Image: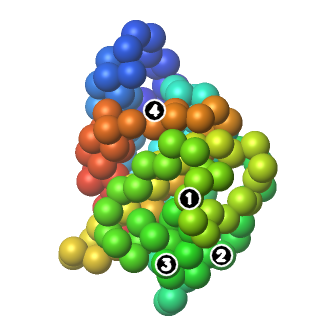
Amino acid sequence: MAEEQIVALGSKSEQYQALLPQIAALLQQEHDLIANLANISAALKTQFGWFWVGFYLVKGEELVLGPFQGPLACTRIVYGRGVCGKAWQNAETIIVPDVRLFPGHIACNSNSMSEIVVPVFKDGKVVAVLDADADVLNAFDEEDKRFLEQLVSLITM
């Protein structure tokens, strides 16, 4: 996947199975974290057409906006607040079928309807989160969780 992504068709599983090796190859060619997170965000947005996808990086006691694709986003998120903050606090992936029903959801954009947040680990600690939002309800499921957790395990921080 050197600057050109092959967009896969088929089931969600088939799309992930085609995308993950492309991202792995990309990460092997580049060692700059920001460049890699930017390209991962672009690849996911291109493949799945999600409303928003990107990363928040742990800096002290908050998450700070990193590379993303989509409309403007919240810049800083406090530990434990919103879906991203909870995923960081709990050190586990959170799937939200309807963001309006998530207690403490941070509405960075009112078009976001569902969300998945996947923690990125280094030495057993959460160092970032991958956040994806869709403008439809129930966009994310256990299949997304499984593949996105595989994807973030490829990231070297």
Pointer 2 residue: 76
Find residue 96 and report its horizontal and vertical position in percent: 49, 49
- Front position among marks 4 and 2: 2
Pointer 3 residue: 80
Q: Residues within 10 Å of mark 1 (few under 14, many from 20)?
A: few
Find residue 52 and report its horizontal and vertical position in percent: 64, 44
Q: Quadrant of the C terminus?
A: bottom left
Find residue 99 and report its horizontal and vertical position in percent: 60, 51
Q: Residues within 10 Å of mark 3 (few under 14, many from 20)?
A: some
Residue in the picture at 46% in, 55% down: 117
Disc 4 secondary structure class: loop
- Front position among marks 3 and 4: 3
Pointer 4 residue: 2
Residue in the picture at 52% in, 63% down: 83
Q: Quadrant of the N terminus?
A: top left
Q: Which mark is residue 119?
A: none
Q: CA distance from mark 4 to mark 2?
A: 31 Å
Q: Is there any visible trace of residue 37 in the rendered image? A: no
Q: Amino acid at mark 4?
A: Ala
In depth, the one of 81 and 131 nearer the eye is 81
Residue in the picture at 43% in, 15% down: 8
Pointer 1 residue: 102
